[in-house]
Image: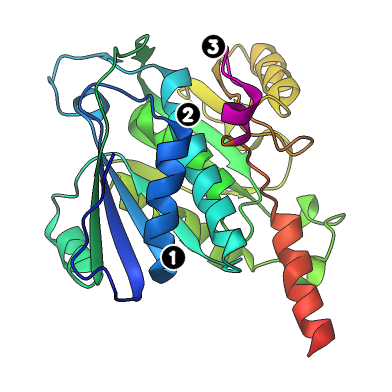
């Protein structure tokens, strides 16, 4: 894997990394770390990673009902990229460094204008490997969360949700009744700002879907009022809540939701849950030590030290 830049000696405010994966979502963590270290070292504020891989395309065929790249494979790749970027930025004392990953080249004029304003572009290539198991698509899906100080863990969840959705994605955002016991609550972002950041990110990664961000005031949200929802995206920790949702839907004679579980994010442990037999050194590259609480605490400490 190698990189080229428009100006190797310059430090840009924002950069783009075009990561070319011809037939694969596998990548050597050490090579990924090398590339991201080089790019982030020369970038002050944010990095946009564009994954260029045929298996990720939503446009392969109008009749396609599955993705040629598997659910587990893609979330492992996103976890690797987001975790590595977070770790590299932290080592460079860039604790609020922003990383975004999109799965295809943007084609909308508005996106092209936005990218044209970014001052550094890097290109990385990776050898091809076999693709994975197919993953089904759903016309209407749902997920929920606080989405405070939107970070890489949120972005991974949102990306996976959008990736399996063909029509409408309900992304319910926690409102006042669910925020009472949050630590460092004074540093919670207002509800409108959290909704706006969620929608902005979703429109960045896929502007073609219908996004709805209703307030979440109970554990169920729109999943028990909209029978047409087909799938619920959740983490391993929120999976019991997914089962509770299906129990409530059954009481209303709604069809059960397909529970699509993200296995690489855990608030209890920063280690990703990898399904393969990679070494502990390799698994450490997938560490996702991400928390909105930690970000709020960071702002709290800044205020206390000023």
The question of residue 278 being in magenta is answered with yes
As rendered, which of 180 and 16 lies closer to the eye?
A: 16
Q: Residue at x 30, y 44 (%)?
A: 206
Q: Which mark is residue 75?
A: 2
Query: Of marks 1 and 3, which one's residue comes earlier in the chain?
Result: 1
Give the spatial CA distance, label 1 vs label 3. Answer: 50 Å
Give the residues in magenta.
274-284
Report the quarter where the N terminus lies. top left
For residue 305, side relative to residue 59 (left or right): right
3 and 2 marks in contact (CB < 8 Å): no
Label 1, on which residue? 41
Counting every numbered tag in the picture gives: 3
Which is more foreground, mark 2 or mark 1? 1
Q: Residue at x 79, y 72 (%)?
A: 186
Label 3, on which residue? 255
Which quadrant of the view contains residue 166? Answer: top left
Say above or below: 283 vs 149: above
Give the spatial CA distance, label 2 vs label 1. Answer: 25 Å
Q: Position of residue 104 (x, y in %)?
A: 23, 40
Question: Outermost residue, bottom direction?
Answer: 306
């Amino acid at each position: 894997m190698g990189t080229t830049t428009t100006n190797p000696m310059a430090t840009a405010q924002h950069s783009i990394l075009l990561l070319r994966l011809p037939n694969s979502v596998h990548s050597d963590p050490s090579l990924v770390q090398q590339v991201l270290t080089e790019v982030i070292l020369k970038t002050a504020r944010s990095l946009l990673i564009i994954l260029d891989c045929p298996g990720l395309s939503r446009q392969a065929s109008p009749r396609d009902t599955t993705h040629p790249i598997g659910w587990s494979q893609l979330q492992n790749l996103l976890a690797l990229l987001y975790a590595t970027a977070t770790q590299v930025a932290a080592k460079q004392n860039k604790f609020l460094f922003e990383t975004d990953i999109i799965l295809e080249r943007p084609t909308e004029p508005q996106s092209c204008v936005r990218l044209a304003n970014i001052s550094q572009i890097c290109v990385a290539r990776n050898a091809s490997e076999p693709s994975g198991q197919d993953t089904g698509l759903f016309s209407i899906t749902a997920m929920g969360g606080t989405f405070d100080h939107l970070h890489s863990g949120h972005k991974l969840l949102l990306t996976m949700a959008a990736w399996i959705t063909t029509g409408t994605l309900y992304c319910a955002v926690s409102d006042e009744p669910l925020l009472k016991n949050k630590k460092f609550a004074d540093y919670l972002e207002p509800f409108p700002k959290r909704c706006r950041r969620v929608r902005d990110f979703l429109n960045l990664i896929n502007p073609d879907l219908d996004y709805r961000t209703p307030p979440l005031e109970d554990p169920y949200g729109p999943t028990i009022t909209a029978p047409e929802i087909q799938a619920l995206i959740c983490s391993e920790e929120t999976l019991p809540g997914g089962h509770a949702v299906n129990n409530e839907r059954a009481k209303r004679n709604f069809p059960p939701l397909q529970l699509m579980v993200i296995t690489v994010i855990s608030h209890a442990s920063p280690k990703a849950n990898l399904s393969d037999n990679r070494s502990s050194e390799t698994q450490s590259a997938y560490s996702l030590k991400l928390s909105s609480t930690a970000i709020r605490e960071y702002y709290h400490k800044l205020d206390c030290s000023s």
